[in-house]
């Protein structure tokens, strides 16, 4: 009897310890009454609304996962989403509102360079913090921005070199009429010339414009070896339509601002030799990406799409959260300093902030657009590339002078 009682006592003790350990492992419910507020600036309407959908979905997933794990510092994270309406001036007003009225401790988003240009003075004036997720033209390094998209040396330049080696050095440039495309092409003109190439023509159309007939006429007349495309938003669909309509479906095309979601919406797979360049592709093999996509679709619906900018904003929120945990505080200036030391896992490997430049190390992948709009990887650079915001083949002074000439010096 004594032995049975002793065994029963041991069993009860083990069950109690197991229950205690389970309670310790369970994430406590975050304090819903005192949330940590962060803000997202994204176009939910206007010419680039299709491009912003992926960034909204992945940002919501990141916040949902943080809260499911107990929040931060025992508090729930609340994402306040504001529609920039694809308008830079609206984005600046909304950034001010998020900081001063809604007390957001960090901001995430913007699509176009013009949006970032408008928001940068706001975050700098308030000594605040913006995480910018887009591949961009470089030539900037704000003390109040973390750039999670690619710099020119990480994407634009090596992808252009790949295209010129594969198709030829006679190049045509097309883009949306704004600072992003004009700055990018300022860099590309020099890079192409230094590589022994020649720019045959260059054309810009208003953001969202469907008037691409003249550009297609240029391409028919000039017959470039490759077209480099920095059109944004719905103009991509009009351009792809016009190329198909002009029997130019076989024209080699490298698109820099259209990811998988845009390719599917705008029919980019109708072109036979259509390529794009990113660090992240939705089609990446491996358990990390498969698990990420499964979580995204459970959270945001089966139709949810991942993109390079979408993953960049997901990573940005995780980097911000890692800094908050390490500090034990969401205070903006402290997080701004601490996030420079952070590295987190990502669906495509890892994401590490380069403290010298406030940009991420990135890997280059080039993919061909399949008929269904999905991307088929054709080239990968095995190593990660250190960010260099100022293209190294000219001096910083040269680039500053170019930006001043365009009336867009940082």
Image (spheres, rainbow, N blue to C red):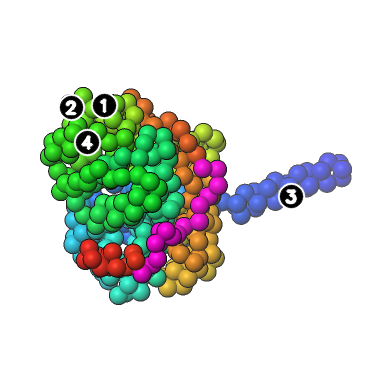
From the viewer's side, name the closer residue of 259 and 17: 259
Quadrant (top left, top right, bottom left, bottom right) of the N terminus: top right
From the viewer's side, name the closer residue of 363 and 26: 363
**Residue at the (40%, 66%) spot, across then down:** 395
Residue 13, numbered circle: 3
How would you classify the magenta stretch by its main secondary structure? loop
In the figure, 209 relative to 376: above or below?
Answer: below
Q: Earlier in the sequence, mark 1 or mark 3?
A: 3
Residue 382 counted in the magenta span: yes
Q: Which of marks 2 and 3 is nearer the N terminus?
A: 3
Give the quarter of the image for residue 241: top left
**Residue at the (35%, 40%) spot, across then down:** 169
The span shown in magenta is 381-397
Give the crowd class for mark 1: few <14, some 14-19, many >=20 residues within 10 Å: some
Q: Which of marks 3 and 4 is nearer the N terminus?
A: 3
**Residue at the (22%, 36%) spot, across then down:** 222
Number of callouts: 4
Q: Earlier in the sequence, mark 2 or mark 4?
A: 4
Residue 353 counted in the magenta span: no
Residue 246, numbered circle: 2
Residue 222, numbered circle: 4
Residue 249, numbered circle: 1
**SS label for mark 4:** helix
**SS label for mark 3:** helix
From the viewer's side, name the closer residue of 370 and 119: 370
Q: Left or right: where does residue 42 sit relative to residue 323?
A: left
Alpha carbon of mark 2 to alpha carbon of mark 4: how far?
A: 14 Å
In the figure, 204 relative to 396: above or below?
Answer: above
**SS label for mark 1:** loop
Alpha carbon of mark 2 to alpha carbon of mark 3: how far?
A: 79 Å
């Amino acid at each position: 009897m004594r032995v049975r009682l002793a065994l029963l006592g041991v069993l009860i003790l083990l069950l109690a310890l197991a229950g205690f350990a389970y309670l310790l492992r369970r994430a406590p419910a975050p304090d819903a009454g005192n949330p940590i507020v962060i803000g997202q600036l994204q176009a939910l309407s206007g010419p680039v609304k299709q491009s912003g959908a992926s960034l909204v979905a992945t940002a919501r997933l990141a916040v949902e996962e943080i809260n499911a794990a107990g929040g931060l510092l025992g508090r729930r994270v609340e994402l306040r989403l504001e529609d920039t309406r694809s308008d830079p001036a609206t984005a600046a007003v909304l950034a001010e509102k998020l900081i001063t009225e809604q007390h957001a401790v960090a901001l995430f988003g913007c699509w176009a360079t013009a949006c970032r240009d408008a928001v940068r003075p706001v975050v700098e004036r308030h000594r605040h913090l913006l995480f910018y997720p887009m591949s961009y033209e470089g030539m900037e390094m704000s003390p109040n921005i973390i750039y999670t998209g690619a710099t020119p040396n990480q994407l634009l330049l090596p992808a252009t070199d790949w295209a010129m080696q594969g198709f030829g050095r006679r190049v045509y440039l097309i883009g949306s009429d704004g600072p992003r495309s004009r700055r990018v092409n300022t860099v590309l003109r020099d890079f192409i010339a230094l590589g022994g190439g020649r720019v045959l023509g260059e054309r810009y159309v208003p953001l969202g414009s469907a008037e691409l007939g003249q550009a297609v006429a240029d391409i028919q007349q000039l017959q470039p070896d490759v077209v480099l495309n920095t059109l944004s938003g719905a103009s991509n669909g009009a351009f792809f339509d016009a190329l198909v309509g002009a029997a130019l479906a076989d024209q080699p095309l490298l698109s820099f601002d259209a990811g998988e979601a845009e390719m599917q919406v705008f029919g980019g797979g109708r072109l036979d030799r259509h390529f794009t360049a990113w660090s992240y592709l939705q089609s990446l093999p491996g358990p990390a990406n498969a698990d990420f996509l499964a979580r995204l679709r459970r959270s945001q619906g089966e139709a949810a799409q991942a993109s390079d900018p979408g993953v960049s904003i997901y990573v940005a929120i995780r980097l911000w959260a890692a800094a908050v945990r390490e500090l034990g505080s969401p205070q903006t200036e402290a997080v701004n300093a601490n996030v420079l030391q952070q590295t987190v896992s990502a669906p495509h490997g890892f994401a590490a902030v380069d403290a010298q430049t406030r940009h991420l190390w990135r890997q280059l992948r080039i993919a061909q657009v399949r008929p269904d709009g999905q991307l088929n990887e054709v080239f990968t650079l095995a190593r990660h590339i250190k960010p260099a915001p100022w293209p190294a083949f000219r001096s910083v002074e040269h680039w500053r002078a170019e930006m001043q000439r365009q009336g867009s010096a940082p």
